[in-house]
Image: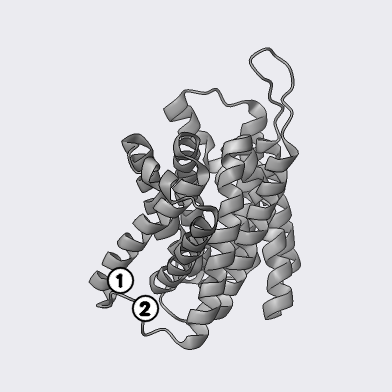
Amino acid sequence: MEAYLGQIAALGTACCWTVTAMAFESAGRRIGSLSVNFIRLVIALVLLTLFCWATRGKWLPLDASLHAWGWLAVSGLIGFTIGDLCLFRAFVIIGSRLSMLLMSLVPLFAALTGWIVMGERLAPVDWLGMALTISGVSWVVLERTTDASGRPRAHPVSGILLGIGGAFGQALGLVLSKFGMGSYDPFGATQIRVIAGGIGFAVLFWVIRWWPRVRTALADRGALARTGLGAFFGPFLGVSLSLLAVQNTQAGVAATLMALVPVIIIAPTVLIYRQRVSARAIAGAVVAVAGSALLFL
């Protein structure tokens, strides 16, 4: 079991991000993606601080090296401030399902970045597993949809580009996190990333004068509840598990398993929204799971 700790953590990350995608899409439609981004980081920072104090006896990750602080801060700015800024806006414009399809590009970006930055190599079986997983995910999410009148839906180009930007930001942030973290505690590393991401948004809000909208968003209790749920399973638990994953396996392999969100999201969609799942969606899930199993070998 310990030999597969990285892969297990990556699958746990995918489960967490399934909850996060649904929660943040709903909250973003109510109070805007920018406000959701900042509020969820504040909530996550509180959770991380309490957790690190309870488990490590430290309120802040002051025991991290300057190397770790520097690279993790950069990864936080790229992953949280830039990458998630794009992704959360894509949630609002094209929805979580198509956004998650575009996030399946993360393994390709992560593998390329891991090769350039850290000299990582992937075996042929890893590439085959990634290909199967990405094919299955794409097969599920690219299923043809129509609007209420029965006409094919046209996806806005801006939403597609934002989704691709989110995928690249997450991949680059993931690889830089692994480079900066080394053997340091994943939750402490996430705390550094969240602090950097929060500062990035604070500066952005000051420049674009967004703070009045944040105060307005705080009055929407329904959106705050969804944001809190997403913050727990996203920046707190999900991101920490993702760092644990890249700490114990190759970045490309971890990113591929994390890209299973569009497949995993089928179950809560059926149970919560009572939506029917097509044979194509089931077939795609089988292909993706087969790819994941191949990565375990």
Amino acid identity at mark 1: Cys
| Mark 2 surroundings: few (<14), some (14-19) or many (≥20) residues within 10 A | many
- Label pair 1/2, CB-CB below 8 angstroms: yes
User: How many numbered circles does the render carry?
Assistant: 2
Q: Nearer the viewer, residue 63 or 111?
A: 63
Q: How far across and how far down the image is residue 191, in percent?
A: 40, 69
Amino acid identity at mark 2: Pro
User: Mark 1 or mark 2, which has the lower sequence index?
Assistant: 1
Disc 2 secondary structure class: loop
Q: Is 143 located above or below residue 72 in the figure?
A: above
Q: Is 145 located above or below residue 30 in the figure?
A: above
Q: Nearer the viewer, residue 70 or 141?
A: 70
Identified at 48% across, 28% down, the residue is 270
Identified at 53% across, 42% down, the residue is 264
Q: Quadrant of the N terminus?
A: bottom left
Q: Report whether 203 appears left or right of 259.
A: left
Q: Nearer the viewer, residue 89 or 202?
A: 202
Residue under label 1, please give it.
52
| Mark 1 surroundings: few (<14), some (14-19) or many (≥20) residues within 10 A | some
Disc assigned to residue 61: 2
Instruction: Indicate how the structure is coloured in the image.
Output: one colour
